[in-house]
Amino acid sequence: MQSIKLYVGNLNYSVSNEDLKELFSNHGEVKDVNIIEGKGFGFVEMGDTTQAEAAKEALDGTEYKGRTMKVNEAYPPRNRTGGGGGGQRRDFQRY
């Protein structure tokens, strides 16, 4: 049995890990909760696919603490390769 991680977005900043654990535990085993502080989103790891799907179906688009939650399956972070920089550096001298 493989656990599934859900993305939970548009959270009220007052929502705690314990709040989410309690809310999602109504739909199955909650293995882990991690709210990204000050960002309004977090992740909930459910016991298996069936439980994760049940939680997603029940909670996506519902209001919780004054905000409408967005619940989706979480995907692994994208590789962020170096980059940017852009163009040549020009040193200007004052005369």
Image (cartoon, helix red, strand yellow):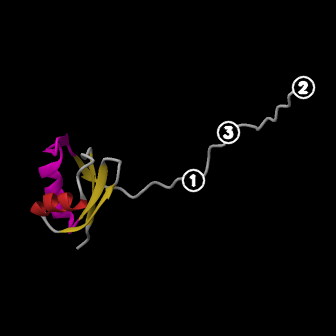
Per the image, the residue denoted by label 3 is 86
Q: What is the secondary structure assignment of the residue under circle 1?
A: loop
Q: Considering only vertical position in the picture, is 93 above or below 82?
A: above
- The spot of residue 31 in percent (x, y) is 23, 69
Task: Select label 1 or label 2 by which is in front.
Answer: 2
Q: Residue at x 62, y 47 (%)?
A: 83
Q: Any magenta on residue 62?
A: yes
Q: Residue at x 12, y 51 (%)?
A: 58
Q: Considering only vertical position in the picture, is 59 above or below 2?
A: above
- The spot of residue 24 in percent (x, y) is 16, 59
Residue at the limit of the structure toward the right, as seen here: 95
Q: Which residues are magenta?
A: 46-69
Inspect the image, locate mark 2, and give the three-letter code of the amino acid beneath it: Tyr
The CA span between labels 3 and 1 is 15 Å
Per the image, the residue denoted by label 2 is 95
Within 10 angstroms of label 1, few (less than 14), some, or many (20 or more) residues? few
Foreground of the two, 61 or 14: 14
